[in-house]
Image: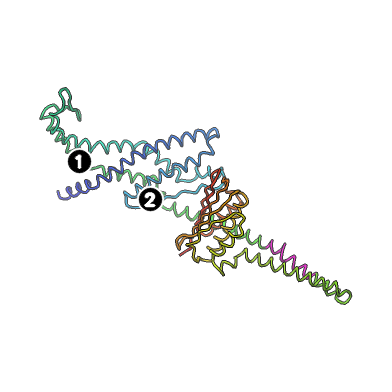
Amino acid sequence: MMVALRSARDKLWRLPGALGYLVVGGVTSVLALFAVVVLLLVGAFCLIGVGIPALPEAVRLVRPLVSFDRRRAARLLGEPIEEAYQPFTGGLRQRVATVFTDPANRRDFGWLVAHALTGIYIAIFAVALPVSALVQLTLPAFWQYLPPGQEFSSYGFTVDSWPMAALSFVIAFPVALVSLQIPVAARWQALAARALLQPPKGVRLADRVAALTATRAAALDAHGAELRRIERDLHDGAQARLAAVIMQLGLADQLHDQDPETAQRLVRKAQDTATDALAELRDVVRNVYPPVLSDRGLASAITAVAARNPIPCVLDLSEVGRRPAAVEAAAYFVITEALTNATKHSRAEGISLVLGGAPELLTIEIRDDGVGGAVETYGGGLAGIRRRAEALDGRMMLTSPPGGPTVLRVELPCGS
């Protein structure tokens, strides 16, 4: 008996929260129905080729609704529900392929359909049951005050006498007991959300391994490309100049006794060529790891880069501090590449750059007021920025609607 009373008291205590959960679920159920209709319409248009460009965006737009229900269910259950989406990157073909290959999209659609078909009805019953219990409980107090000709009908009988009013009062108790099961219904709905939306065990780890494998391959490709660039710079620049120095000094040695004046001119020319070769070697070293990073830190290096940029830059470097060398080098090249891209393509009049973040995460946000429409293409500068970020287990986010502004945000973990 005491156990039953404690259980009823616990359910009564949780009743308002559960009722609110199911009512909000009714609202999201209507939105889910609308989302399912939109997705089906876009899918139908895809059959004739018209809706294909809109398909990734339609899937992207319904994700906040699913994420909202995922967070609500997690709060009710008291445990997180993992979210494992594959990012929409690359060209249209790759984004459309992600729509169909990402299991999370199929889980989202299944939840939207199930929630659209059931959520609104569960919400209606959740509201109707306690209201009905209150009405049945209080009906004996007001039925006799109803205007003549008006009768109150409920549960198949009409309350027009005291015996019927007493029956209504008795019925209120089983209805109230059923109403106490609303927290159980809310928990079932949350469990259903978890079952449909949470990835199976091991999928998150498998996705993580796949992502790290891909980023490792991209990092190796970027490293190989960097080595080839250094080799090319050395071969075409410093090596060629040093070979010219050797030839000029060899000729000067041969002409030393016959034509001292020409020999002296060749020596001066060799000296100038050696100076140029040294400058090129310094440029190569600077591109590998700018000395200013180790000497003066990331903030000073970025300030120097921004000062040389043709487009005026407004900097916010108040929370930078020193970071690991690999992170500072990646941030330096990300910013220089982003500024170069903006200078070439954005037609902007101003750029703002914010660099900071917590000690364990360096964040870079670059915003320009240009024409927008920036698109990541294979082998382009933005793709290189993404590779540099992902090589450090970071990420890049790009927002560039037509007409601007373009906002590039890069997050680089610092491993602390």
- 110 left or right of 266? left
- 44 left or right of 221? left
Q: Which residue is mark 2?
A: 81
Q: Is residue 180 visible?
A: yes
Q: Gap in Å between the C-alphas at discs 2 and 1?
A: 31 Å
In the image, residue 225 lies at what x, y percent?
63, 58
Mark 2 residue type: Ile
Q: Over which residues does the magenta segment extend?
A: 231-247
Say above or below: 233 vs 178. below
Q: Is residue 326 visible?
A: no
Q: Which of 382/305 is in front?
A: 305
Rendered image: mark on residue 177:
1
Residue at the farthest right position: 258
Residue at the farthest top position: 149
Label 2 SS: loop
Q: Which of 52/111 is in front?
A: 52
Residue at the farthest bottom position: 257
Query: Along the polypeptide, which appears first: circle 2 or circle 1?
Result: 2
Q: Which of 190/380 is in front?
A: 380
